Amino acid sequence: MAKNNIRTPIVCVLGHVDHGKTSLLDKIRGSQVVNTEAGAITQHIGATLIPIDAIRKMSGLTGKTEITIPGLLFIDTPGHRAFTTLRARGGALAEIAILVIDINEGFKQQTQEALQILRNCKTPFVIAATKVDRIPGWRVHPDEPFQKTYAKQNERVQGILETRLYEIVGELSDLGFNSERYDRVRDFARNIAIVPSSGITGEGIPDLLMVMIGLAERYLTESLKITADGPGQGTVLEVKEERGLGMTLDLILYDGTLSVGDEIGVAGASGCIVTKVRSVLKARPMKEMLIEDRFERVKSVTAAAGIKLAAPNLDEVISGSPLRVIKGNRDEVIDAINAEMQAVNVKLSNLGISIKADTIGALEALSKELEAKEIEIMRADVGPVSRHDIIELETMREPLHKVIICFATDILPDVEEMLKHPRYADIKVFSGNIIYRVIDDYIEWRDEEIRRREAQQFEAIIMPAKIQLLPNCIFRQSDPAVVGVRILGGLLRPKVHLMSLDGRSVGTVKMMQDKGETVTEATEGMEIAVSIEGPTVGRQIHVGDTLYVEIPERHVKVLEREMLSHINVSSQEALSEYALIRRRDNPFWGK
Ligand SMILES: Nc1nc2c(ncn2[C@@H]2O[C@H](COP(=O)(O)OP(=O)(O)OP(=O)(O)O)[C@@H](O)[C@H]2O)c(=O)[nH]1
């Protein structure tokens, strides 16, 4: 185990979809050193341990270089989600990260998001610029350190690699990060190291591991000091049923020791669960693995390790939850676990949408993203979407708040049924396993909904218009009067009342015709024939008269306060002239 009680740092791999996270992890896990005598890579449950001796051997480091870190423990599940949902003591469980960027594709949306997450969590990380073997003309030298294989490439290939690398450096710099190819970095505190590598050929992987060791040595040794014989502390990765064992927890133990017979506290859906460890299980080495007997029973394990435990009463445990061994401090552990579950860092508003996620970390991650997009949250809960959630939503007044966004959690079957009922037709549920996608779906729906509403409002509101009676175009004197008019501004529609400059009502537009065709709208500059019910030409209206559409006071308020930016300049002018006429007698009209 660890020298000076320094344990292995916990590592997570992040990056854009398809940029090669899984391949990189697989390559690291399956590296050729598996069977060397120099400390074999060991499979843990949910994690893989690469001992320092294996890393030394891969990268050709002599025993002289002083290293205190005993190795690296990689969490087997890559991605943002694993990073954000697995937490320890309020922070991310992973203490160091690899951000994977496909060197041929460069920056993508999730690359930026991952950077944001790493920045928020202040996690040291290294960038693996993967898929170097896809650079046209690249000559593969399996598993070689980067500099060796790079030296054997021709100049053109080297040139392409440099150009692409500098594109990444540029993008990072736009986001405020200084970075450099790892072998040119002088100060790892100021520069992020980029290691060109391949998850398929293994090139650059030894360098990647070495840089990580360097970072961990420098930044983490204090936080990696463990109390080996202290009570175990861990984070639950998964809750699953195993044949012959019943309910089990897969967890990463990051501090202390956990033994069979220990009393533990762990978070359940309705508070802290206290139970007693029945068995502690480790993964069997690959070659000994039999279907029937995948696990090796042990008496006790010391951090850091990925293990499985069986105990009674685990059904309700929430994945991502904290786990602590109780050593005469039962109340303290219960309080701490309850506090950690309640300290969900979600900003709630009086009004807003509802959110659900499978773990606390996931809920926080979702809420952070929503907050960044200025979307208000009223309720936030861990667990599947239940009938109760839907009933609560139904009481919301604002249709835009009758929304539940659920991330990586189930919708209970009876809820699906319930939502088919017309009564709940206006409740929207957005669900998915990628935060950004669920949020985008919601935003798309919301914006469309707002546009639809505005359009409806526009339909219902009488729009301003200013028209003038044209000379030589009196087709009929009265009942109705049919005259040629020019639209001086705004939007004329049928069925509106018209008003003269002195504020008198003169009649109602019945029909409108443009070049013999009936039309329902006419805009600035058009000359059309209109039939007007009410006036007689020569008495109430005359050639050359300017008339305005009469707009009710309530509509003027809506137009002036909410719709001004949505109507064109000529409509705005017609509106303000019309309002001026109305306000001659009453300055507060429409205000
Ligand atoms: N040539 C080459 N192909 C690679 C490399 N890394 C990944 N690939 C290929 O790229 C594709 C995606 O790789 P994955 O490792 O699944 O990528 P990922 O980031 O884990 O993808 P998601 O899990 O979908 O986010 C696969 O077809 C891999 O074989 C590499 O270094 N070189």
Image (cartoon, rainbow, N blue to C red):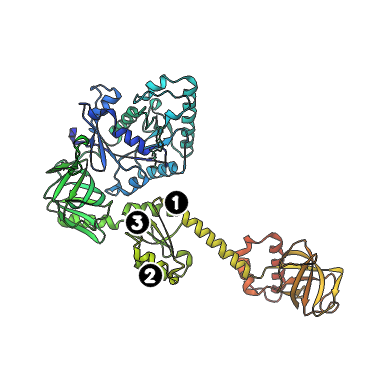
Residue name at image x 73 percent, y 67 percent: 519
Residue 241 location (% of width, % of height): 22, 53
Residue 559 location (% of width, % of height): 63, 67
Q: Indicate left or right for 226 with 342 as reference.
A: left
Residue name at image x 39 percent, y 37 percent: 20
Residue assigned mark 3: 409
Residue 580 location (% of width, % of height): 71, 70
Residue assigned mark 2: 391
Q: Quadrant of residue 356?
A: bottom left
Q: Residues within 10 Å of mark 1 (few under 14, many from 20)?
A: some
SS label for mark 3 = loop
SS label for mark 1 = helix
Residue 42 circle label: none
Choose between 54 and 177: the one closer to the eye. Answer: 54
Residue 437 circle label: 1
Q: Amino acid at mark 2?
A: Ile
Q: Amino acid at mark 1?
A: Arg
